[in-house]
Amino acid sequence: MDTSTSVTNSSKLQISQFILMGLPGIHEWQHWLSLPLALLYLLTLNANILIMITIQHEPRLHKPMYQFLGVLAVVDIGLATTITPKILAILWFDAKAISLPECFAQIYAIHCFFFMESGIFLCMAVDRYVAICHPLQYPSTVTKAFVFQATGFMMLRNGLLTIPVPILAAQRNYCSKNEIDHCLCSNLGTISLACDDITVNKFYQLMLAWILMGSDMVLVFCSYALILHSVLKLSSAEAMSKALSTCTSHLILILFFYTGLIVVSVTHLAKKKNPLIPVLLNVLHNVIPPALNPMVYALRIHELRLSFQRLLGLGGKVSM
């Protein structure tokens, strides 16, 4: 094993880089996963860029719901780009080494983008709640200024509260093993290599997850519970169907996102029995949603689908 160590002023051996080993248990043939992963990354980039261009160029989509969707597209590209290129470098070029600063930077970026995705889902849920439950107040409440302020708040919240995660990880003393059984620098996987106590790191990680992700999830599902309650009181089946159709795509992706998060968290507890499953699910949960989000919205939202056709010249003149 390449220990990659250097001597510090305190005469302790300090690791200067980590080795990302990839997917545990399948190192010999994990390179075969590079093709679907590369295709998934290209799909993520192209689909989300198309979403952003369509929203920008189509005046009919200059509405808060689609503006939040544009922000989500930026976040999806950021999350995928933070993770996928390094994984492909490991699979294609055996570029497993990563310096400590690069590793801690990746930890910070992953946390920021991941929490940002959850925050934007909350903003979109609030947007649908006001639109359906308080339609008369919607034009004056959910404005462009609201979109800007909500997005700015989420960026500030996630950016500031995430800073201690890499800082605490960087303060640990890494003096022996430097091989991480993962494709990326996960916080818990990295600090598990530390030679000193990591109780503070684990506590802050848990607290951050509960404060940010937990509160977002509770508020999102409360919003949709109120939406469902309001929709069920409608006398017209057509009005009920129309109201629910605007929320279906959001709800599908939100359920997938939070269900995946819960599954990843639960399987992490069984890591010692089968280390491959939690690592693989962690990677998939970071690379699949950025590709899935634009596809679901394109298929489920009629106005967005027609705008795609107009932009690409596939549908001729489309009457809206």
Image (cartoon, helix red, strand yellow):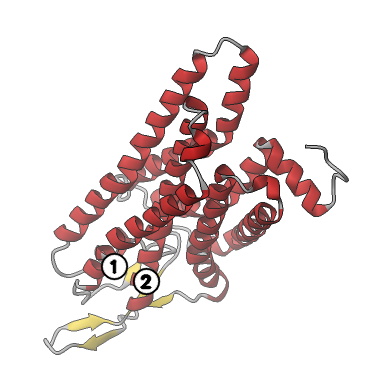
Q: Secondary structure at mark 1?
A: helix
Query: In terms of sequence position, does the residue under pointer 1 or pointer 2 come before the other?
Result: 2
Q: Is residue 127 left or right of residue 301?
A: left
Task: Give the farthest residue toward the left.
Answer: 10
Q: Residue at x 57, y 25 (%)?
A: 244
Q: As drawn, which residue projects farthest toward the right?
A: 316
The C terminus lies in quadrant = top right
Q: x and y percent of residue 90 in the render?
A: 50, 71
Tell me which amino acid carries mark 2.
Ala
Name the residue tied to disc 1: 166
Mark 2, secondary structure of its residue: helix
- The quarter of the rendered structure image containing the N terminus is bottom left
Instruction: Say if 175 sits above or below 221 in the image.
Output: below
Q: Nearer the viewer, residue 40 or 292?
A: 292
**Can see residue 103?**
yes
Q: Residue 30 location, x and y as percent?
A: 53, 61
Seen at 55% across and 76% down, the residue is: 93
- Front residue of 275/34: it is 34
Q: Which residue is mark 2?
A: 105
Residue at figure coordinates x 37%, y 58% from the top left: 111
Q: Position of residue 52 (x, y in %)?
A: 63, 56
At label 1, the amino acid type is Pro
168 and 14: which one is in front? 168
| Number of numbered tags placed on the structure image | 2
Q: Residues within 10 Å of mark 1 (few under 14, many from 20)?
A: many
Say few, some or many: other residues with alpha carbon within 10 Å of mark 2 (under 14 / 14 to 19 / 20 or more): some
- Residue plotted at (58% across, 72% down): 92
Determine which quarter of the picture holds residue 21.
bottom left
Q: Are marks 1 and 2 in contact (CB under 8 Å)?
A: yes
